[in-house]
Image (tube, rainbow, N blue to C red):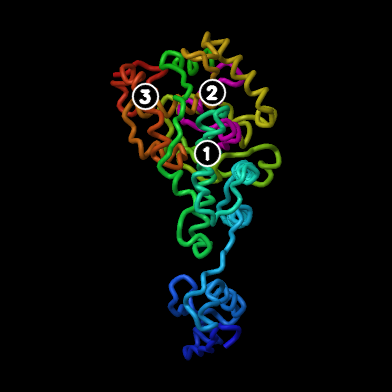
Amino acid sequence: MADGIYLTDLWKGKEEQTGLRWRVRVRDRNTGEWATKTFPSEQRKLGVDWGKNKRDGMAAVFVGTMNKPREKVLLPTVNVLTDLVQRIEGKSVKRSEGHIEELTRVVTAAIDAGITELTDRDIGRRAQRWLDGLAHLAPATRQRYMAHLKAIGRHALRFFADEVDGRDPFLPLANDDLPQADPEVFTVDESRKLVADGALECSFGPAVAISLYTGMRLREVLWLRWSAVDLERKQLTVYPPTEGERELGHKVKRNKKRLLPIQHELLAILRHLPHDDDYLFDEHMRTRNNAQYGRYLRDVLAATGVQVNDQQGRGRSFHSLRHTHISLALACGIDSMAIQLYAGHSSSAMTKHYAQATESMKPDCRKWNESFYLRRKAP
């Protein structure tokens, strides 16, 4: 027995399980029952730490009375944030640097606003009041803030369950979704202009067409390799950036491989693009900044007579092409689950967010039958 923790040596007779193993037995502070767990020989310290964690706060057991109140256990939000980031960075499939940076920034801002102690029973309501006070931010941005806080809550529940008493600290946020504005999209007629021959003659025109036909994000398009494009099988693969590509500015939202179908019309466009390099677009095009890409898009819009602002007066960006693709795909009957998978959406709710834009496109897409007819006439 060591400091209230019983350690028993276990010997496994079989050769494939040779070596010393430790059985740790301790009085669980939450249930009052004895808890037992076995650890390999090289993890003896881990077993002792596990026993101490179970035992702490139940000093009453060892002094002979069960009426002494449990000592208060603290779990600072910053500790959970640090642990979560370390585990994310340690995964073989990592999240993007931008995701980790935003997670850290948002949770740090919440801590500065007083959301500091996850064992506080009122922390969920305090977090909701903080989110409600961010009315100056776009609804989608506040939704992401909420998602980051909920990630902290899930992580605490998974890895610090004893400290939070098996309770998600941010459970009050779970069913309180913030409203999101409708996505900015191009109409069907505008989309036809953006893939017409006049648009494709612009240096940035092929990038616009690829995004409109696939829903790929800007840098996913610009850093696309020919080796990832299978014209025979009519599919392409989006790969996470390599270390060298990240150093040159290729950052993505999600570091996950995705398989996307190639629409028949896009297939013809790709076959006419030069195959002079491993990449579809040269290094000069791949390494520009966002302001320059904005100018390139406006050049294509000007050449095709498409306005920058939509019918509600909202400015549209390259990402609006992704919104347009998803809306067109839903309107022409492509299964929403398939769209969620190849678009890389984290949930079906994100895909369904495009429902309103889809309704306005359905009259033009009713004969498309899961194919895009932007350069041809539908049957």
Which image quarter is the N terminus in? bottom right
Label 1–label 2 contact, CB within 8 A: no
Q: Quadrant of residue 47?
A: bottom right
Reply above or below: 21 against 346.
below
Secondary structure beneath label 1: helix
How far apart marks 1 and 2 lie (CA) works out to 41 Å
Range drawn in magenta: 200-227
Q: Which residue is denoted by mark 3 in the rendering?
A: 358
Secondary structure beneath label 3: helix
Kindly report which numbered mark, 3 or 1, lies closer to the viewer in this rendering.
1
Q: Earlier in the sequence, mark 3 or mark 2?
A: 2
Q: Is residue 184 left or right of residue 72?
A: left
Residue at horizontal 56%, vertical 25%? 207
Residue 343 in view (yes/no): yes
Residue at horizontal 45%, vertical 80%? 34
Q: Which residue is denoted by mark 1 in the rendering?
A: 129
Reply above or below: 310 against 151.
above
